[in-house]
């Protein structure tokens, strides 16, 4: 793994949360997009080398909606950038890590993503992401 790519924060109301983070960080989001396969609307902020991804559900059955209903708004995941997603999956499986899905999916911000299950990462959902070239 190279570095932390971003921190994902689950929010109930994207317009309200965008305004909050614009005030907090002093910048506007640089990108917003919907990942329809996951039922999520995203908004990205970047301040020098730190990225924050806000995630809002687009329907009641989406993973973000279920997360908010169970835990409330807050940190949803930490994403780490990797050079080769398939190699990382193999290496981490060999180390005993459990994945939510073992096959990478198209995520937001031009990335392929896979998630480690929080059961064996101290309760933190970990995303591995690789830039689509």
Image (spheres, grey):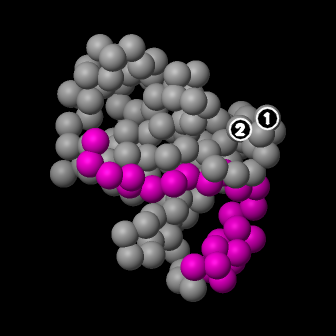
What residue lies at 70% left-to-right and 68% top-to-bottom? 17
Judge the density around disc 1: few (<14), some (14-19), many (≥20) Cα neighbours within 10 Å: few
- Position of residue 74 measured from the top left corner of the image (x, y, whole percent): 70, 52
Q: Which residue is mark 2?
A: 67
Range of magenta residues: 1-25
Q: Which mark is residue 70?
A: 1
- Position of residue 87 measured from the top left corner of the image (x, y, whole percent): 21, 27
Specify the quadrant that holds the N terminus: top left
- Lateral position of residue 27 relative to residue 19, left or right: left
What residue lies at 26% left-to-right and 48% top-to-bottom? 2
- Lateral position of residue 62 relative to residue 133, left or right: right
What residue lies at 48% left-to-right and 37% top-to-bottom? 126
Residue 93 in sight from this viewpoint: yes
Residue 58 in sight from this viewpoint: no
Whether the residues at callouts 2 and 1 have beta carbons within 8 Å, the answer is yes
Numbered disc total: 2
């Amino acid at each position: 793994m190279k570095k932390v790519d971003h921190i994902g924060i689950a929010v109930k109301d994207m317009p309200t949360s965008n305004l909050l983070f614009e005030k907090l960080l002093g910048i506007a989001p640089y990108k917003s997009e919907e990942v329809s396969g996951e039922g999520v609307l995203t908004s990205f902020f970047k301040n020098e080398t730190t990225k924050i991804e806000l995630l809002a559900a687009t329907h009641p059955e989406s993973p973000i909606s279920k997360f908010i209903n169970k835990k409330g708004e807050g940190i949803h995941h930490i994403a780490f950038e990797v050079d080769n997603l398939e190699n990382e999956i193999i290496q981490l499986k060999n180390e005993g890590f459990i994945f939510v899905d073992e096959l990478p999916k198209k995520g937001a911000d031009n990335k392929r993503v896979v998630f480690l299950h929080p059961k064996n990462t101290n309760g933190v959902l970990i995303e591995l992401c690789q830039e689509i070239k």
